[in-house]
Amino acid sequence: MRSTTHGEIHTARGDALGAPDLEAVLALRTAVFVVEQECPYQEVDGRDTDPGTWHAWIGERPALLAYLRVLTEPDGGRRIGRVCTAAAGR
């Protein structure tokens, strides 16, 4: 973990992400993408617990401040998947 002015930066590989952290991540993503931005799409895509997925977030459960997900593609390349910041962090 690293510290920022907004708290600790936490990271976890998808297959090591615990249920409480996953729940906090999904709550933030749903609040930002589905509720605030009114983008009614399936937020849970089945990639969060993949071993090649990396998660990084700032804040403590249950109210995360910011989040980033990096996905490993089938060809081995990586791409940024989800990025969001809670309204309180903007």
Image: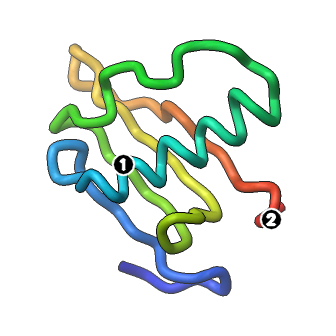
Quarter of the figure that contains the C terminus = bottom right
Q: Secondary structure at mark 1?
A: helix
Q: Residue at x 49, y 61 (%)?
A: 57
Mark 1: few/some/many CA within 10 Å (<14, 14-19, 20+): some
Q: Nearer the viewer, residue 31 or 67?
A: 31
Q: Residue at x 32, y 46 (%)?
A: 54
Contact? badges 2 and 1 (CB < 8 Å): no
How far apart, in angstroms, are the residues tagged by discs 2 and 1?
A: 20 Å
Q: Is 6 drawn above or below residue 40 in the view shown? A: below
Residue at image mark 2: 88
Q: Is residue 80 left or right of residue 45?
A: right
Residue at image mark 1: 22
Q: Secondary structure at mark 2?
A: helix
Question: What number is the disc on residue 57?
Answer: none
Q: Is residue 79 left or right of residue 78?
A: right
- Residue 10 sits in which quadrant? bottom left
Mark 2: few/some/many CA within 10 Å (<14, 14-19, 20+): few
In the rendered structure, which amino acid carries the disc numbered 2?
A: Ala
Q: Residue at x 43, y 24 (%)?
A: 44
Residue 32 in the image: state x and y as whole percent: 71, 40
Quarter of the figure that contains the N terminus = bottom left
- In this rendering, the count of numbered labels is 2
Q: Is residue 36 left or right of residue 63?
A: right
In the rendered structure, which amino acid carries the disc numbered 1?
A: Leu
Q: Is 42 drawn above or below residue 23 in the view shown? A: above
Q: Nearer the viewer, residue 85 or 54?
A: 85
Q: Residue at x 44, y 30 (%)?
A: 79
- Residue 76 sits in which quadrant? top left
Q: Is 37 drawn above or below residue 28 in the view shown? A: above
- Residue 59 sits in which quadrant? bottom right
Q: Earlier in the sequence, mark 2 or mark 1?
A: 1
